[in-house]
């Protein structure tokens, strides 16, 4: 550890409890104190730089210290930093809502704001349940979810997810949900297309809806990519079939676009690739370009109308967060959306995604790589013990951690999900920086699988 970083590491470990971390790991891999960021790069107090290949947990879209987003937040800071959104409003939240409605699938016309992705999922789950109560169907109170799904860490969001690593210990605290096999195309048989596998897997969902529609409030899915579940991917046909089935069975569809929205999958929203409109769409992470915590749940006029009544009917949605619709966060979000509009971001990303995919697919022949998969600006490499059988490494060996440690030594921030090495870089990344990411990942794979 550099002497310039050491004092901050000592102070950190005296008091800070880091997220998603076994703190004992920091005895051999100390946290890295970051002094500044610029573009796709982070810099520590010793002057070492790290290419942010994971967008600082998937949030950063247009680089660190982006001058246009900086300017928007700075200007807003001089006017209004925070105001209660109950009984008051402000121009940034109004304008942001107008812009999101214009971008979202037609019919999503209402925005309910919260602070983070998990909170957005809580809002959508509560709102769906409450809707059915308000319209006289209180028996519709259960939720259908996909295996291997992830929707956040608060108790409601954790309940509707299915990653055992996060969920199992808290199971006694969680509501009971209906879990349906995922359309995850990594599981497809040899010779079966993504579309064919996803279509076949939908039979499980159709069966669950037929059995449980009378008691089901909503189905919740991550469109196209199950990110925390190992960047597992599926075909848009599944979403098309799901939308039609939810309509037939009178069950809401919640699209958790928290990680996959804002261009990550190649379209502005992942749902666009199936041509569908969910009943609720949860947004966060890239919503502010990665600057400030903010989330929103977008929904329809019929759902909004079910809560619109005289107060004494007690139909109002009385859910709140202190920083709901924070003006600074809204200003950052508006600046991020302006960059999309003005810079042709999606078009530029198509070229970047093509280069990223081509370079990553060079690893397909590696003896310990079972699959290289891609959806837009998300690319994942499945590291396995045996390529032929796809048998994974024992999880306790933590091969992915070896890739992470090597990448840091080489100046790249990779943070594998288990043994899945993935790239989800900011949109300001260059082809040369992509080359560095992939080269370092290749080196890491060699080191992690040589034993």
Image: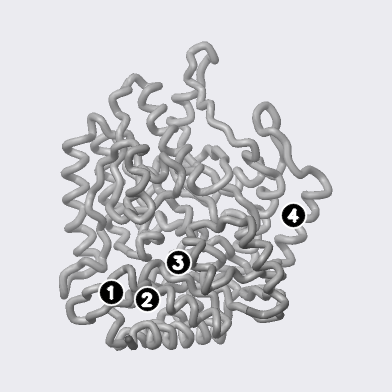
Q: Are marks 4 and 1 in contact (CB under 8 Å)?
A: no
Q: CA distance from mark 4 to mark 1?
A: 46 Å
Front one among 423 and 200: 423
The spot of residue 297 in percent (x, y) is 50, 42
The spot of residue 152 in percent (x, y) is 44, 49
Mark 2 and mark 4 lie on one chain; the one further toward the N terminus is: 4
Residue 182 is drawn in which quadrant? bottom left
Mark 2 and mark 3 lie on one chain; the one further toward the N terminus is: 3
Mark 1 and mark 2 lie on one chain; the one further toward the N terminus is: 1
| Tag in front: 3 or 1 | 1
Q: In the displayed structure, would residue 370 be above or below residue 175? A: below
Residue 160 is drawn in which quadrant? top left
Kindly identify which residue carries mark 1: 393
Q: CA distance from mark 3 to mark 1?
A: 31 Å
> How many numbered tags mark residues here?
4
The spot of residue 79 in percent (x, y) is 82, 45
Name the side, left or right, on which 77 lies relative to 256: right
Kindly identify which residue carries mark 2: 399
Q: Are marks 1 and 2 in contact (CB under 8 Å)?
A: yes
Q: Residue furthest top?
A: 312
Kindly identify which residue carries mark 3: 266
Name the secondary structure under disc 4.
helix
The spot of residue 112 in percent (x, y) is 55, 38
Q: Residues within 10 Å of mark 4 (few under 14, many from 20)?
A: many
| Tag in front: 4 or 1 | 1
Name the side, left or right, on which 450 lies relative to 300: left
Residue shown at 66%/53% (left/top)?
Answer: 334
Q: Residue furthest right?
A: 78
Mark 4 and mark 1 lie on one chain; the one further toward the N terminus is: 4
Kindly identify which residue carries mark 4: 73
Q: CA distance from mark 2 to mark 3?
A: 30 Å
Q: In the displayed structure, would residue 209 be above or below residue 77? A: above
């Amino acid at each position: 550890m550099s002497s310039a970083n050491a004092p901050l590491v000592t102070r950190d470990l005296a008091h800070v409890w880091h997220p998603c971390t076994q703190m004992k790991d920091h005895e051999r891999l100390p946290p890295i104190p970051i002094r500044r960021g610029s573009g796709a790069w982070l810099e520590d107090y010793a002057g070492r730089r790290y290419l942010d290949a994971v967008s600082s947990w998937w949030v950063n879209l247009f680089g660190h210290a982006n001058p246009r987003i900086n300017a928007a937040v700075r200007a807003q800071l001089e006017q209004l930093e925070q105001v209660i959104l109950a009984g008051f409003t402000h121009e940034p939240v109004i304008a942001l809502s107008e812009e999101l409605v214009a971008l979202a699938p037609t019919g999503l016309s209402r925005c309910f704001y919260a602070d983070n992705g998990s909170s957005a999922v809580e809002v959508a789950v509560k709102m769906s349940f409450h809707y059915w109560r308000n319209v006289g169907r209180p028996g519709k109170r259960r939720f259908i979810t996909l295996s291997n799904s992830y929707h956040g860490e608060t108790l409601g969001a954790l309940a509707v997810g299915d990653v055992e690593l996060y969920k199992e210990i808290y199971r006694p605290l969680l509501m009971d949900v209906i879990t349906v096999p995922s359309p995850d195309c990594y599981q497809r048989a040899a010779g079966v297309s993504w579309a064919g596998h996803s279509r076949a897997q939908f039979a499980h969902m159709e069966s669950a809806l037929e059995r449980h529609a009378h008691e089901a409030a909503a189905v919740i899915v991550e469109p196209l990519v199950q990110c925390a579940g190992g960047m597992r991917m599926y075909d848009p046909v599944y979403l098309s079939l799901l939308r039609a089935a939810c309509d037939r069975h009178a069950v809401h569809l919640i699209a958790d676009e928290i990680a996959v929205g804002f261009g990550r999958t190649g379209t502005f929203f992942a749902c666009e690739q199936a041509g569908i409109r969910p009943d609720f769409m949860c947004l966060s992470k890239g919503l502010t370009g990665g600057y400030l915590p903010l989330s929103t749940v977008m929904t329809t006029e019929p759902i909004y109308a079910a809560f619109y009544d005289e107060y004494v009917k007690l139909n109002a949605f009385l859910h709140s967060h202190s920083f709901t619709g924070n003006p600074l966060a809204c200003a950052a979000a508006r600046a991020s959306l302006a960059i999309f509009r003005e810079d042709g971001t999606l078009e530029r990303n198509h070229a970047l995604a093509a280069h990223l995919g081509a370079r990553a697919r060079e690893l397909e022949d590696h003896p310990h790589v079972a699959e290289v998969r891609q959806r837009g600006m998300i690319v994942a490499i499945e590291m396995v013990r045996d390529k032929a059988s796809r048998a994974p490494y024992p999880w306790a060996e933590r091969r992915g951690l070896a890739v992470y440690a090597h990448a840091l030594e080489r100046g790249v921030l990779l943070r594998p999900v288990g043994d899945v090495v993935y790239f989800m870089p900011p949109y300001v990344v260059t082809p040369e920086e992509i080359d560095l990411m992939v080269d370092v990942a290749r080196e890491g794979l060699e080191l992690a699988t040589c034993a």
